[in-house]
Amino acid sequence: MVMIFKDTECLLFDMDGVILDNTYDNNFWQNQIPSVLAKKRQISFEDAKRLAIQIFNYKKNSKDWYDLDYWSNMLDIDIEKQKKAKESYEKIRLYEGSISCLEKLKGKMKMILITNAHRKTLNIKLQKYDLSPYFDEMVCAHELYYVKEDVQLWYMLRSRYRIDFEKTVLIEDTIKNIYMGLSAGISKAIYLGNEKYASSNKILSMSSINDVPSAFN
């Protein structure tokens, strides 16, 4: 039986891994950038990939991790240009059922997109799939000076957009982000990921975004 969320006034939607699949981002950082780095430094792809992983892991879960300008300066590569390249851009894909879900929920409650993606990355994705009509706000955590893995982000979000967290549901594919949101006072969460987590009456696990509207019937 599906948990029904009553009296919900606001939905906080993650983007990557919830609305869009992760193919674009994973391929970009794991293959495309190492390939560019290999040519630039005249080293093998394997060596470039090892170097990239070492550099990226140093900044994982930090604000810099999502900052395109930071990586452009660090790697001496135009990251935004590479993200717009055809071989990368064509890998931006919606999860099946994403638009149907958003259409069913739009107008029933306030809808906010909250993503760790840099604004430049968000804009590139919106050029392919314009999600803006479905959301009242589209927020890049980067611009609030924190990432979703940091509880301070959620406090900043609540204050900036005057959200009543007691009547808010977070929809995420990263369990740590859910824990941070709940610890900041968000009432409930829908989890669309595969990580194991301790059972909680505040977290509803679903297999895909297709199922989300059924929690608000």
Image (cartoon, helix red, strand yellow):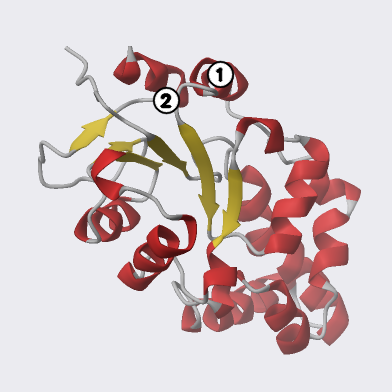
**Quadrant location, the N terminus:** top left
Instruction: Examine the image and state in which quarter residue 205 appears.
Output: top left
* Residue 190: percent from left, percent from top: 31, 35
Taking the spot 61% from the left edge, 49% from the top edge, the residue there is: 138
Amino acid bearing label 1 = Gly
Q: Quadrant of the C terminus?
A: top left
Task: Give the amino acid type for the residue marked by disc 2 in the picture.
Answer: Ser
| Residue behind mark 2 | 208
Q: Is residue 177 left or right of residue 76?
A: left
Residue 60: % across, % down: 47, 74
Q: Please rate how many residues cluster around mark 1, counting C-alpha atoms within 10 Å: few if below 14, some from 14 to 19, many from 20.
A: some
Residue occupying the point 79% across, 51% down = 124
Relative to 185, residue 49 above or below: below
Q: Measured from the top left, where is residue 58 in percent x and y?
A: 48, 84
Distance between mark 1 and mark 2 Cα atoms? 8 Å
Confirm or deny contact between disc 1 and disc 2 (CB under 8 A). Answer: yes
Q: Image check: 121 left or right of 168?
A: right
Q: Secondary structure at mark 2?
A: loop
Instruction: Tell which of 185 and 123 is nearer to you.
Output: 185
The quadrant in which residue 109 appears is top left
Percent position of residue 111, x then y: 50, 36
Q: Which mark is residue 33?
A: none
Above-or-below relation of 38 to 202: below
What residue sits 23% from the left and 53% below the top? 182
Label 2 neighbourhood size at 10 Å, few (<14), some (14-19), many (20+)?
some
Residue located at (23% from left, 31% from top)? 204
Q: Which residue is mark 1?
A: 97
Q: Secondary structure at mark 1?
A: loop
